[in-house]
Image (cartoon, helix red, strand yellow):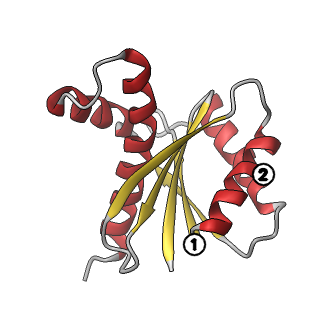
Amino acid sequence: MRIVGFDLGTKTLGVAVSDSSQKIAFSKETIRYEGEGLSSLAQKACEYLKAVPADTVVLGLPKHMNGDMGESAKRVIAFKEELLKHDMELKIELWDERLTTKIALNTIAFTKTANKAKKRHEKVDSLAAQNILQSYLDRINRV
């Protein structure tokens, strides 16, 4: 089984997927949901999860640098609750995502992956999801 990583933004959901050995995370896509609610996004996410298939979702939890949780973290928790309503027998892990977007932006700048701002923004979300998932995979695979 694979593990899926999600990075929830205000308009997009970055998606990453592990390999079958659950050792390496791959950036996959960005799901747009601008103007739609979290319930609609959860439906789209569940359709994606059925196609993968996965038994675990790692959902980035945006904490402030001091560890406090703000509005973005509350949105992630609400999104988790929406996913759970779909009863897909998924394990949903909340995972500290501090600095993952910054790391993704630095990666894009360093590799010159995307020249246009729109392309860069689309890539950032899925790369942030990849960073979230990879840190989770590294943690569970420590021996």
121 sits to left or right of 105: right
Residue depicted at x 75% and y 71%? 88
The circle on residue 135 is: none
Depth check, front residue: 48 or 71:
48
89 sits to left or right of 24: right
Q: Is residue 65 visible?
A: no
Which structural element holds mark 1?
A: strand
Vertical side of 77 occupied by 116: above or below: above
C-alpha gap between disc 2 and disc 1: 15 Å
**In the current view of this chain or complex, which residue is farthest to the top?**
117
**Label 1 packing within 10 angstroms: few (<14), some (14-19), many (20+):** many
The circle on residue 54 is: 1
Which structural element holds mark 2?
A: helix
Among the 4 quarters of the image, the one containing residue 78 = top right
Inspect the image, locate mark 1, and give the three-letter code of the amino acid beneath it. Ala
53 sits to left or right of 25: right
2 or 1: tag closer to the N-terminus = 2
- At which x and y percent is residue 31? 60, 40
Among the 4 quarters of the image, the one containing residue 81 = bottom right
Inspect the image, locate mark 2, and give the three-letter code of the amino acid beneath it. Gln
- At which x and y percent is residue 27? 39, 51
**Label 2 packing within 10 angstroms: few (<14), some (14-19), many (20+):** some
The residue tagged 2 is 43
75 sits to left or right of 23: right
Q: Can residue 132 be seen in this view?
A: yes
Among the 4 quarters of the image, the one containing residue 22 = bottom left
Residue depicted at x 19% and y 27%? 112
- At which x and y percent is residue 39? 82, 44
Depth check, front residue: 102 or 55:
55
Q: In which quarter of the image is the C terminus?
A: bottom left
Residue depicted at x 71% and y 46%? 79
**In the rendered picture of this protein, how many numbered marks are placed on residues?**
2
